[in-house]
Amino acid sequence: MLTYIYVIAITAEAMSGALAAGRRRMDMFGVGLIAFVTALGGGTVRDMVLGNYPITWTQHPPYIYLTILAGLFTMAVARYMHHLHKIFLVLDAMGLIAFTVIGCNVALRLDYSLPVVIMAGMMTGIFGGILRDILCNRVPVVLQHELYASVSLVVAILYLSMLALDINHDLNLLISFGLGLAMRLAAIRWSWSLPVFHYAPGRWKD
Amino acid sequence: MLTYIYVIAITAEAMSGALAAGRRRMDMFGVGLIAFVTALGGGTVRDMVLGNYPITWTQHPPYIYLTILAGLFTMAVARYMHHLHKIFLVLDAMGLIAFTVIGCNVALRLDYSLPVVIMAGMMTGIFGGILRDILCNRVPVVLQHELYASVSLVVAILYLSMLALDINHDLNLLISFGLGLAMRLAAIRWSWSLPVFHYAPGRWKD
Amino acid sequence: MLTYIYVIAITAEAMSGALAAGRRRMDMFGVGLIAFVTALGGGTVRDMVLGNYPITWTQHPPYIYLTILAGLFTMAVARYMHHLHKIFLVLDAMGLIAFTVIGCNVALRLDYSLPVVIMAGMMTGIFGGILRDILCNRVPVVLQHELYASVSLVVAILYLSMLALDINHDLNLLISFGLGLAMRLAAIRWSWSLPVFHYAPGRWKD
């Protein structure tokens, strides 16, 4: 089941990457590359940091094709996509959760310690978007507002706690996705966000 | 022969990196680093993604010196370089093709599957320029216009097809360079480019 | 003793990262991530380039906590930090030197050749700041002005020369830190800098 969600997740991420590329008026190649990097870049960074070779997507060519094609397909249907805005947000949230759970499992399998396992989950969840924004020459949105990375952190801790408690894995996934999705959508609905740090030297007189 | 072309290629790439650094008014150190990264960064990303350790340039110090010195040399002769603009474009195109062929061979040697071999060739060809543009805080030009990455893709497919057909390797290289160079120069001459994706929400009323 | 300096160094680097994040109005998560990346990113890039797995910080969770907490702590005390500006510059300089020495030793242990050892020292010293600036969407300051990377280069050469001459290691560290610190502070005090390369095609008529 996680595989199905993963496939949906990388497709949604690839499409979000393609839209970002379109905002920068990239050509077909740029769109395909940004789609690929947004969808599979988080896992790539995780694998490179953990030394997990060969990197996952190099062993699964269909994922490569899927993300690039999803990007190119987005070029064709972009004008209708704002109708799908809400579905898109749900798919993106499911992707974030799926990536987090998968990333934790990769680090667990390699016997990393708990904090690194949590970071591996978060890296998988958010670094695709960070690489997308670096390539599009903008400050990564995930660092600026909205509960996005925080959802990944909460899901990682929740999932790993239930794993430690030997709770049935399907139930664990159900709860992790349910609560993660609820938290993410509530954060969007009510604009929840973390405190922002605004540092402007000269802003304080003293 | 590929080695000679490779040396010319990294020199040309280093010089293009130095010019980009100069546009950002970098100091000597910045110029040397951008020259190095532009010339050898594509191969570095490829080696890190494929897990090909030790990374190539760490075993060939002369390449390190060559790229840094080419960058510093560019500082001295920059004011005369626009006279050499056309030679430069040819060298850059030869570099793109040489990098592509070399990248494919590295992945082949490591037994990666065909799509990964092609991507390894393209990564080697274009990621030096992408890293250069990220460090210079601009949207990577290779993602925006002109047939550049596409030349790399066509060369990779052409070269690998002839390899599969057991065509004499020197002849293979000759054809790959000939057609690749022709395609790249024609793309520059007649401003060939891929369709561009311009996504601006609010642009379509419906 | 190098460990103590290292702990001070990553704390100072994390705080400098947090301030950069504050200039971009990032949220708590962004501040923590930039702090972590600024402090430990140089070593991460070095380990990934040298193939030195597992990457250092993955084996030392306290370093992860320390850098993130230092970043969050900076949010609270930022308004008082300009009073500490000078102490900060000294700690940052000590961090640069400590990172350089540690980076050289990692590469030495892996039997890399001399130029790669020097580059490993410099990478450790400056890539944290480069990643910080990329994530904050600005041209890396280290590439633009002031003797910063050059201090790292001089320290690396000095330290390795004394190592080759079998000079007592504590004395070696004392001299490396003394001269490195003096050079960096003199560079700040008298605005020493390397020649800048300003390339603007069309600037020269000929």
Image (cartoon, coloured by chain):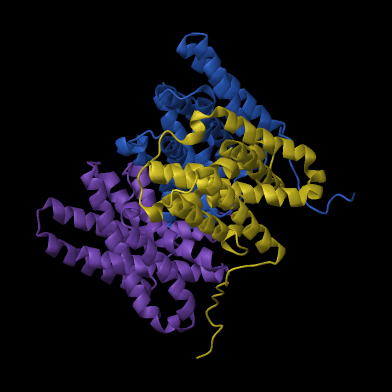
Chain colours: A purple, B yellow, C blue
Residue placed at 75% from the left, 52% from the top? B86
Residue placed at 50% from the left, 66% from the top? A31
Return the residue found at the far right: C206
How many numbered callouts?
A: 0
Question: Residue B129: in sight, yes or no?
Answer: no
Location of the N terminus of chain A by quadrant is: bottom left
- The answer to which image quadrant residue A156 occupies is bottom left
Q: Nearer the viewer, residue C87 or A116?
A: A116
Q: Where does residue B59 sit, x and y in percent of width and height? A: 49, 29
Q: Where does residue A94 sit, x and y in percent of width and height? A: 29, 68
Q: Nearer the viewer, residue B134 or C133?
A: B134
- The answer to which image quadrant residue A181 occupies is bottom left
Return the residue found at the far bottom: B206
Relative to B88, B39 lies left or right: left
Q: Where does residue C168 sit, x and y in percent of width and height? A: 47, 9
Q: Nearer the viewer, residue A136 or C139?
A: A136
| Picture layout, residue A82 above or below residue C198 | below
Residue placed at 50% from the left, 17% from the top? C173
Relative to A108, C134 lies left or right: right
Q: Nearer the viewer, residue B97 or C204?
A: B97
Residue placed at 65% from the left, 49% from the top? B92
Q: Where does residue A90 sit, x and y in percent of width and height? A: 32, 74
